Image: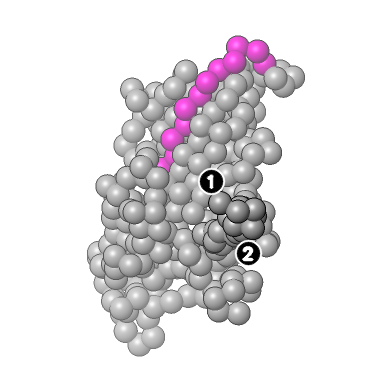
Amino acid sequence: MNRRSQVRSRRPTLEGLEPRAMLSTLHVGGGSSGNPGWVKPAILQQVAASLYAPITTTTTTAVGNQTFPAGTYAVPQPTKAELHRETFWMEFVGHYYVGPPRFSNQSATIHIYSNGRNVTSNQTSHARAQLILFPPADPSASPTTNDPMAGQVAGLLSLFPADALQSGSSLFAEMTNLPGVASNAPGTLDHGLPSHLQFMLDTGGVTGGVYSVPLYTLVTPSGLSSPIVGGNGGAVSNNVGGGVVDLKYIPTGIPHASGARQSGTVLVRVQGLINTTGVTNPLYKSIN
């Protein structure tokens, strides 16, 4: 081989790379093929059955010049494509701290932070998250008018997207026991702390951006007027949402915050359905 051919054979070349497009909230979901293995279709179906259950009224309801008696009315059911669009999951490894309770009906205050790490989610490519939990002082206590959360875990989950596509968005969800499951039931605790809970989207106006709640009222096909959107209006509500929260605690044995009686690392996994409007993202490149 002559010198010219040797030089030609060593000439550098360029290889094509697959694209790395930013995620967008308008591309939420991903279906079963796009979700991690811990996201279970059976759980999503259970959530759908709860969110889009029939509405029961206890009083006569007037809509226009029509009057509807008290009863149970079915709501429209989400299609397969809609369940695909509403699918929501997030996961992160953060830190937790167990401190003293704030009130007499609580046994502790549990803070959980993503601690500067990105949250993995089908909702956003960059995010931070926080949770706070208040286990009950007496898991056997029954709710009363003066203490409606007696015996129940109370908590709040927050997600703050941090990339340009979701600028200004914030998601808040209330957490408590799964329906009919006691706070201290086997399988719901890990290292003595709540580990298996449900969440419901907080529609009190705290959410923002892509999770904003429209302030108008819709009328269902049955003729009944639904609550303000975001309430228990089944498929006629925007921003209805709920699901399951699973926590795995790994104690360090060394408190990392003043007054913490337990702390360590925690794996947080959230899966469920959130019905966003899909029209509050001004930067989504496919439509604007």
Location of residue 46 with respect to 261 vertically, above or below: below
Q: Residue 32 at what x, y percent from top left?
A: 33, 53
| Number of callouts | 2
The residue pinned by badge 2 equals 165
The residue pinned by badge 1 equals 120
Question: Which label belongs to residue 5?
Answer: none
Q: Residues within 10 Å of mark 1 (few under 14, many from 20)?
A: some
Q: Amino acid at mark 2?
A: Leu
The Cα atoms of the two marked residues, 1 and 2, are separated by 15 Å
Q: Residues within 10 Å of mark 2 (few under 14, many from 20)?
A: many
Location of residue 182 with respect to 234 vertically, above or below: above
Most extreme residue toward the front is 2
Location of residue 251 with respect to 234 vertically, above or below: above
Q: Residue 285 at what x, y percent from top left?
A: 59, 74
- Residue plotted at (31% across, 37% down): 180
Is residue 91 part of the magenta span, yes or no? Answer: no
Q: Residue 63 at what x, y percent from top left?
A: 37, 81
Q: Amino acid at mark 1?
A: Thr
| Residue nearer the viewer, 73 or 270 | 270
Q: Is residue 93 visible?
A: yes
Is residue 247 part of the magenta span, yes or no? Answer: yes
Magenta highlight range: 240-255
The answer to whether the residue labelled 1 contacts the one labelled 2, judged by CB atoms less than 8 Å apart, is no
Q: Is residue 234 visible?
A: no
Element type where label 1 sits in the image: strand
